[in-house]
Image (cartoon, grey):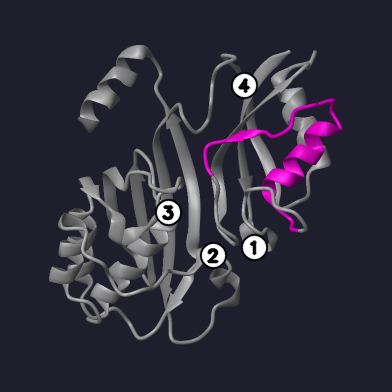
Amino acid sequence: MARYKAIIAYDGTHFQGFQRQAGARTVQAEVEEALRSLGWRGDSLLSSGRTDTGVHASGQVIAFDLDWRHSHEALRNALNARLAEDVAVRQVEEVAEDFHPRFNAIERAYLYRIIVAETRDPLRERYAWRLWPPLQAPEALQCAAQALCGSHDFAAFGMPPIAGGSTLRHIYQAEWRVHADEWVFEVRGNAFLYHMVRRMVWAQVQVGQNRLSLRDFLEAIHQARPLPPGLAPAHGLVLTEVRYAENRQEAKNWIRSLL
């Protein structure tokens, strides 16, 4: 029996999120069914976190214990042969028996895609939020993204996964990249609150459309002042990476950076 870490990707369009729930098609349930066909007897696989209904992933991380006598590549291929076309195992490796994809993670990365177009674009809108009218203050959008970096109380941007939990988070990178009519928001942090990235995107778009002042946005970051309700649509969001310390020194440096 060994513990395996797997990186999985999925198109979230037809899933009711990652986490298993009765009567709903979820990523976790699909992967667990595939595992059971290979002799897995666990109650629940471990994951780096849950994603909302409609959210996609290219770098979700799971872990499970399995008695497997073949190669890692054979395990990956066996799982993919049993999974639907909208979910796939990208990589499998054996890890320490106490590895946990959520609690051992030191960094998570998300990407949110926006297209600015007056008319519908069916081929791209499956994975992007179409905005119209255009952003009136794109420079304010960049300023808002830069202000997200650092350690802050992000209570205005989401709820902790555990009731009563801390809303303090550290953002390492937050920036917008622009190419033609496409805006891509990339954000990396030690952890994220429930709905935090979608809330960040929505609030920044309000700033960019002159519907929310940059001052109010900054006060939400630095003083945890409430913002008007709103969420960016789920289908523009992708969990792209979950990173782990490569050695003890990196883990120590990560802990020190949060203090």
> Neighbour class for label 2 at 10 Å: few (<14), some, many (≥20)?
many
Q: Indicate which disc, 4 or 3, sits on the residue closer to the N terminus.
A: 4
Query: Could you tell me the amino acid type at mark 4?
Result: Glu
Tell me the distance, in whole angstroms, between the alpha carbons under discs 2 and 3.
11 Å
Q: Are marks 2 and 1 in contact (CB under 8 Å)?
A: yes
Q: Which residue is mark 2?
A: 235
Looking at the rendering, the stretch of residues picked out in magenta corresponds to 24-49
Q: Are marks 2 and 3 in contact (CB under 8 Å)?
A: no
Q: Which residue is most to the front? A: 164
- Taking the spot 74% from the left edge, 17% from the top edge, the residue there is 71
Q: Which percent across, then down, holds residue 204? A: 28, 68
> In the picture provided, is 165 more to the left or to the right than 33?
left
Q: CA distance from mark 4 to mark 3?
A: 25 Å
User: Which residue lies under the disc numbered 4?
Assistant: 93
Disc 2 to disc 4, C-alpha distance: 29 Å
Q: CA distance from mark 1 to mark 3?
A: 16 Å
Q: Which image quarter: residue 188? A: top left
Q: Is residue 177 visible?
A: no
Between disc 2 and disc 1, whose residue precedes?
1
Disc 1 packing (10 Å; few <14; some 14–19; many ≥20): some
Residue 199 is situated, as x and y percent measured from the top left of the image, at 37, 63
Disc 2 or 4, which lies upstream in sequence? 4
- 1 and 4 marks in contact (CB < 8 Å): no
**Viewer can see residue 72:** yes
Q: Secondary structure at mark 2?
A: helix
Residue 244 lies within the magenta run: no
**3D distance between C-alphas at marks 2 and 1:** 7 Å
What's the mark number on residue 111?
3
When asked about the image quadrant of residue 220, the answer is bottom left
Who's the residue at 46% across and 29% down the image? 103
